[in-house]
Amino acid sequence: MRIVLAGSSQQPNGIERYTDILHAALDGRGHDVLTFAPSQGSGRLSQKIQAGLNRGVGPFASATAWKDLAAAATLHRADLVHYTYPQYLAPWSGPPSVVSVWHSHLRPLRRARTSAERGERAVDGFLFGLSDRLAFRFADRLAAVSRPAARAASEVHDRVDFTAPFIPESMIVPSGQRRKRTAVVVAYRLDEPRKNIRLAVDAVAHAKVPGLELLMVGELGRLGSLPDFCRPVGPLSRSQVSEVLGESTCLLLPSLYEEFGYVGLEALAAGCHVVAAPLDGYAGMQSSGLQVVDRTIDGFATAIDRSTDDVGTVELPPECRERAAVDRLLRVYEAARNGPD
């Protein structure tokens, strides 16, 4: 099958990470995969295409991206286009399309009540933007990254499937070995308000683990002064992040909302415990190394203490392993190509 992946190029994030991982997995299954990214911004996916590291059909000018993509998909005789990020999806006369639904598209109602007055539609505790609903309208199928997203998306589209993000088998390492007493936070920009990093700092300060450090991966920005137990290391490559996670006690995810929280899966694959706020991407997810706790200092501090005491096996959820996830997504592709049920 010849597949075009249309990804986001705005900044390094979970969506771009998913696009990279999916490209490699589909290519490994023998599919002919092309990658498209709008040329605006300086995201790594766009840079990789420009450098020729991925075989791409773009990047193209953002103002006419959907027209360029339609023409390119037709020119390259693509069987299907998968929008891993629904940018610039508009009336479409090209091959069948699948659109991923991420949590950045399902903004909490409390953050957008004024937007609701402009005609955006509240669904199951989320608010679909007008542009998102327009993109979803023209998709043949929606591929939601979590069960809550699938339920919400079902209100605006009648062909929705749950297709979890996944981690390559090559990244899954044995767990159970002794680790440094280190908690980790990872973000592109640590001062971004939605990352809620100050909660992680306060929780580590209240944890009972002696000598616990907080390793801070990413750009500090204007985060301000930090306690002595905080150790900023700046931005790291993906392989370096995986190495850090493999040596650490737990990853902290105190975010107010996330596209998914992909780094949490990477942590579980590396055998690192994850302490997460009630993010929808982790709702109903079953893993021996995952604790979903209230977004409070005490809740996070207690979970940090538990993860430090627990030397058991940390396992990646079955639906987030490569074989099962890719099998499921390929069934969605075939359903999109075969038309409405």
Image (spheres, helix red, strand yellow):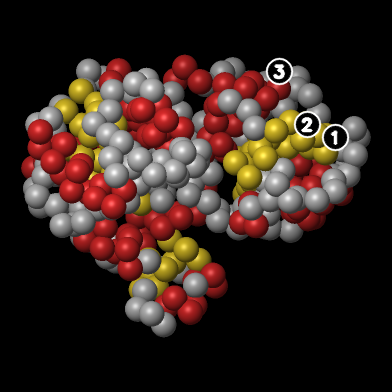
Task: Report the residue at 74% width, 58% height from top.
Answer: 296
Q: Marks 2 and 3: in contact by CB < 8 Å? A: no
Number of marks: 3
Q: Which residue is mark 3?
A: 177
Percent coordinates x, y for residue 68 in the rendering: 19, 43
Q: Marks 2 and 1: in contact by CB < 8 Å? A: yes
Left or right: 304 as drawn, with respect to 49: right
Label 1: how many Cα within 10 Å (few below 14, some 14–19, many 20+) = many
| Residue type (three-letter) at the residue carrying disc 1 | Leu
Percent coordinates x, y for residue 164 in the rendering: 39, 41
Label 2: how many Cα within 10 Å (few below 14, some 14–19, many 20+) = many
Q: Hey, which quadrant is residue 117 in on the image?
A: bottom left
As measured in the structure, the alpha-carbon distance from the residue carrying label 1 to the one carrying label 2 is 6 Å
Q: Nearer the viewer, residue 122 or 132?
A: 132
Percent coordinates x, y for residue 72 in the rendering: 16, 36
Q: Nearer the viewer, residue 88 or 29?
A: 88
| Residue type (three-letter) at the residue carrying disc 3 | Gln
Q: Nearer the viewer, residue 211 or 65?
A: 65
Task: Report the residue at 36% width, 74% height from top.
Answer: 120
| Residue type (three-letter) at the residue carrying disc 2 | Thr
Q: Give the mark, 1 or 3, whose residue is nearer the N terminus.
A: 3
Q: Hey, which quadrant is residue 37 in on the image?
A: top left
As measured in the structure, the alpha-carbon distance from the residue carrying label 1 to the one carrying label 3 is 18 Å
Q: Give the mark, 1 or 2, whose residue is nearer the N terminus.
A: 2
Q: Which residue is mark 1?
A: 212
Percent coordinates x, y for residue 17 in the rendering: 45, 34
Q: Which residue is mark 2?
A: 182
Q: Hey, which quadrant is residue 130 in on the image?
A: bottom left
Could one spot residue 277 in this view of the protein?
no
Tell me: residue 262, above or below residue 248: below
